[in-house]
Image (tube, helix red, strand yellow):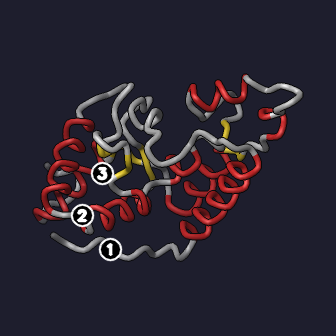
Amino acid sequence: MSRAPESPHGPLLPILYREIEDRCRETAESLPPWPCRRGCDDCCRRLAEPPRLVREEWRRIEIGLQGLAPEVRSEIEDRLVATAELDTGPVVCPFLELESGACGIYDHRPSTCRTYGFYQLRDGAAYCRIVEEHADRDTEASPWASKIVWGRQESIDHRLKQAYGAPIPLRQWLRERRDSTTGQQPGTS
């Protein structure tokens, strides 16, 4: 398998991921028990649509896939192809290890997975029903929701787009990935 190319855009993703991690850790520590944790896969089983990511995040995912055992990678590859055929959700994340509820590419997961449950969209939530239930239990004795300082998902998306271009859908990434391994020019298949 070919090695994923190096990014020409420098260290934005590691910086961005560190900022996200810091915010999420501060939120989770200040409002225990925060529901987002290993094994809670509610959001992973209910994606609104197949993934759409900037190429740099797809590149990182490719690196994560290359580090997996061949049989695990093969299972994920099959799920990627099946998921790419879907136009709308809910869909199960193709990287989810279905039995354990863990992410198969956790260290290489994209920003949208890192922010989900901790960031909001301008016009609504970017979190699951479990986080919403915790926020709805806001009481004087446990002022959960009033203490949350939500991150802005649009800000993350804007920074990614500025650095790496518009997100591309899973289907397009798979096509470009296949074309790069077969030597075809993108878009000629």
Determine the CA span between mark 2 and mark 1. Answer: 18 Å
Q: Which residue is mark 1?
A: 5
Give the farthest residue toward the right.
140
Query: Which percent across, then down, holds residue 186?
Result: 23, 56
> What kind of residue is marked 3?
Trp
54 or 104: which is nearer to us? 104
Q: Identify the image quadrant of the N terminus.
A: bottom left
Badge 3 or badge 1: first in the primary sequence: 1
Horizontal placement of 175 versus 182: left or right?
Answer: right
Spot occupied by residue 39 in the image (x, y as percentages of width and height): 43, 44
Spatial CA span between label 3 and label 1: 14 Å
Q: Residue at x 79, y 44 (%)?
A: 149
Residue visible at 49% across and 50% down in the picture: 166
Give the crowd class for mark 3: few <14, some 14-19, many >=20 residues within 10 Å.
Answer: many
Q: CA distance from mark 2 to mark 3?
A: 19 Å
Callout 1 amino acid: Pro
Q: Secondary structure at mark 1?
A: loop
Q: In front of the other: label 2 or label 1?
A: 2
Relative image position of residue 163 (x, y in whole percent): 56, 63
Residue under label 3, please give it: 173
- Pick whichever of labels 2 and 1 is earlier in the sequence: 1
| Type of amino acid at the residue the image marks with label 2 | Leu
Q: Residues within 10 Å of mark 1 (few under 14, many from 20)?
A: few
User: Which residue is identified by label 2?
Assistant: 68
Towards the viewer: 96 or 80: 96
**Residue 60: percent from left, percent from top:** 39, 64
**Is 164 positioned to the left or the right of 84 in the image?**
right
Give SS at disc 2.
Answer: loop
- Judged left or right of residue 132, residue 145 is right
